[in-house]
Amino acid sequence: MEAFGLLLHGFAVLLTWKTLVLMMVGLVLGIFVGVLPGLGGPNGVAILLPLTFTMDPTSAIVMLSCIYWGALFGGAITSILFNIPGEAWSVATTFDGYPMAQQGRAAEALTAAFTSSFIGSLVAVLLITFLAPMISSFALKFGPPEFFAVYLLTFCSFVGLGREAKHKTVISMSLGLLLAGIGMDTVSGNLRMTFGSAELLRGINFLVAVIGLFGISEILLTMEERLALRGHAASISLRVVLSVWKDLPKYWVTLLRSSFIGCWLGITPGGAIAASFMGYNLAKRFAKNPESFGKGRIEGVFAPETAAHASGTAALLPMLALGIPGSGTAAILLGGLMVWGLNPGPLLFVEHKDFVWGLIASMYLGNVVGLVLVLTTVPIFASILRVPFAAVAPMIVVSCAIGAYAIQNAMFDIWLMLGFGLVGYVFKKIGIPLAPFTLALVLGNRAEDAFRLSMIGAGGDLKVFWSNGLVGSITTLAIVLLFWPVIDVLLARVGLTQRSEPEPPRGESPLDSSA
Amino acid sequence: MRAGLNSPAFVRKMHRIPGNKPNNNQGTKLVRILVKTVGVAAALSLSTPAFAGWEPTKPVEIVVAAGAGGASDQMARMMQAAIQKNNLMKQPIVVSLKGGASGAEALMYMKSSEGDPNKVLIAYSLIYMLPLSAKIPFNWRELTPVSVIALDQFVLWDNSAGPKTVKEFVAAAKAASAPFKMGGTGSKREDHVLTVFLEQKTGAKFSYLPYKSGGEAATQLVGNHTESNVNNPSENLEVWRAGQVRPLCVFDKERISYTSKVTETQSWADVPTCKEEGVDVQYLMLRATFLPGKVTAEQQAFYVELFHKVTQTAEYKDYMEKQALKPIFLTGKDMVQFLEEDDAVNKSLMTEAGFVAK
């Protein structure tokens, strides 16, 4: 119970008026930053970092981490209302959140998103509080083969568990992998597919692609179909909030599963993005009627949001304990720590107890305050829906352009964003899913590097992916998931499974039954 | 949203148009207005001397050619803090990370910002190596040199459970059935070059694993996924203090000068040089600042003065010791001479290692 005493000490450090005010300011700034596509968590924190130089480290980190929580909350808002993910990890939230808004259930979807965000981070903070030392040694077990196995698992779960036609998923993913190869190749140190262009040197930025693929293409489609965004009188009362909360216990399996995936991927830097997709896919896979996903099902909001938040929060643990940032924002916070003279590493927990436990306590408090704050401001955000489309559309396009430009200060990125808008429009028209494309774009490089490093280390022997229990089980699970549709059919034929089977707890059971 | 848009970085981004060269007349007018409006504050602050010459009129951007948390980023944040805390400049400082394409992004960005005196690059050996290995169309002579501010060391590290001395390490590497794995940052760069020369001098074989950052190389060594790395002192500092890795030797002709204890028993000065241990490999890496090409002599002089002042702050001194950097301050002709010599050394190393693209 040493952790508990330390945590109380952390709260004592935290509970001053000054810190609480900073916390509120940070949260509000974070929500705004999260709402703007492209100008998400990492950029927001980077811009505001210099403001904190004059503060003491604890106040500074409390404010910055509250911007981070705010951005995590805010990312859901545009995904649900406009089908434009404000953050990469909100992409999966659009799948069911946007249909819900179209059906006039925006308030419900937003409440669900915020609530599940809160649950996700709460689970992750609990984990951080009590398992910090153990977890940091677990993360050290990850070498190149283990990293590759995790990425492989993410890709395979997409193909095997996705709702779309398998060949379309594979086409989309391959195109994403191809584009991910543009730029400098870390392993050989050579340039690839840049064709002598200085603009292509840095590769295709994932956020620029996402803003175009989802944001711009959606505007194009809406224009074509003359669909109006207006009209929903979103009157959110305490009643809606309470009714969503009342139904919450029904979804405990989804929430727990997503929290688990999120924590796991956050600690092993797979990232919030992979976590949100994986959470969504597994929720769909184990649901009784998977067809209803993508048509406005509340579970489709719960699953990715819980996972994204759990992972976003858990990503701070390897940052503090090992100095490896699990996410872009964690990387900026890492820079901040060093300015304040705190070096992340195993000793931080020993030498700067005030700071570490102040931060952990602020995770609890920041999330509670954040939840209350976003819930009370839901009417303001939902009222955006009442503005006519003709007025909103140009604003969205401009905000997308600013977001795309601000990431790397490059005019080229705006053209790239528009190009991806057209690609997204065509993909949506011919029914090629966009999610595998974006996933491949963000993880493709890392997966490739991890694979090639494993091969260099093992002298080209593929057996390295089964060289120990950890990597072996992840790789095997990945392959089982890839061929899951086939295995599922075979098992059904043998008569081992029935359609009405109760929900199994997680990925383990398909493995057991096939073994 | 509003706060985001009004923040200095954002305003700067919105105002920058490619190829837009600042107008000096307008600039001085702006300064006058600014001086009037912040007159009281400026007059009260003793540490802000009145510059006779040019002064930045827009927020100054420190361009980092590496990712977040790396050695260059840490240096940029130290400068940002030193300049702001000591009021060395009126305009705010923004750090922008341009680590894309192993840092080539930053180089091309500086090259294309010709004539813009509000951007400062924190350079290291990549300015010589990238144009050779990846044929990036870049030449440091096109930029305006400001100052060399530090020299960075390289140290041979192994896991604290591994061999205890260089001799034991080399013997173990030679005896191993599979080659020892050596972690490092990037491919065909300083870490990779050092590995090649280590192989030549010792006769042992290593498989070099290029990671994205020194921090990653450090963690992978702690997790026993590699047998060794050649990280800078700053990159392995914390894991050394935690007793997870061991410094075997430093690649310099003399030991590091800092004698205060870093771990419970050892200081940087206790680490032997590789030469002492019978492996004669030496390499030091510059840390220098550059402005884009075609800026005026006045603008160059302002930054020379600014960084000179930075080197006298407590923040800088503290930083140098913590990161075990070798102090140096070169400007003007001395700097250019240093760069030319350093360039020649790096070129010959790269050629000998076979890393120059044909």
Image (spheres, coloured by chain):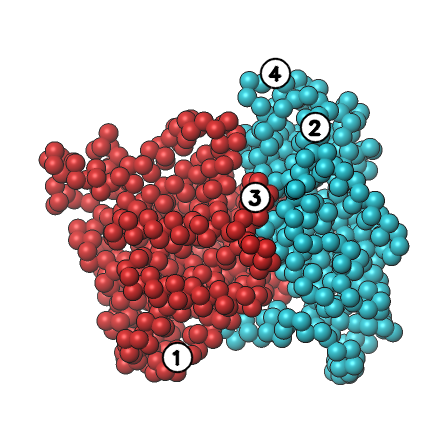
Chain colours: A red, B cyan
Tell me whether marks 1 and 2 sit on the same chain: no
Q: Secondary structure at mark 3?
A: loop
Q: Chain of mark 1?
A: A
- Name the residue tied to disc 4: B175
- Disc with the residue nearer the chain's start (2 vs 4): 4
Residues at marks 3 and 2 touching, judged by CB atoms closer than 8 Å:
no
Residue under the point 16% across and 36% down: A491
For the residues tagged 2 and 4, is the chain the same?
yes
In what element is the residue under mark 2? helix
Question: Which three-letter amino acid code belongs to the residue tagged 1?
Answer: Val
View extreme (front): residue = B358
Judged left or right of residue B309, residue A248 is: left
CB-based contact (under 8 Å), mark 1 and mark 4: no
* Residue A54 vertical placement versus A453 (above, below): below
**Label 2 is placed on what type of residue?**
Leu
> Residue B198, labelled with which disc?
2
Query: Which chain letter goes with mark 3?
Result: A
**Three-letter amino acid code at disc 4?**
Ala
Q: What is the C-alpha distance between the residues marked 1 and 4?
A: 69 Å
Q: Residue A392 got which mark?
A: 1
Q: CA distance from mark 2 to mark 4?
A: 16 Å
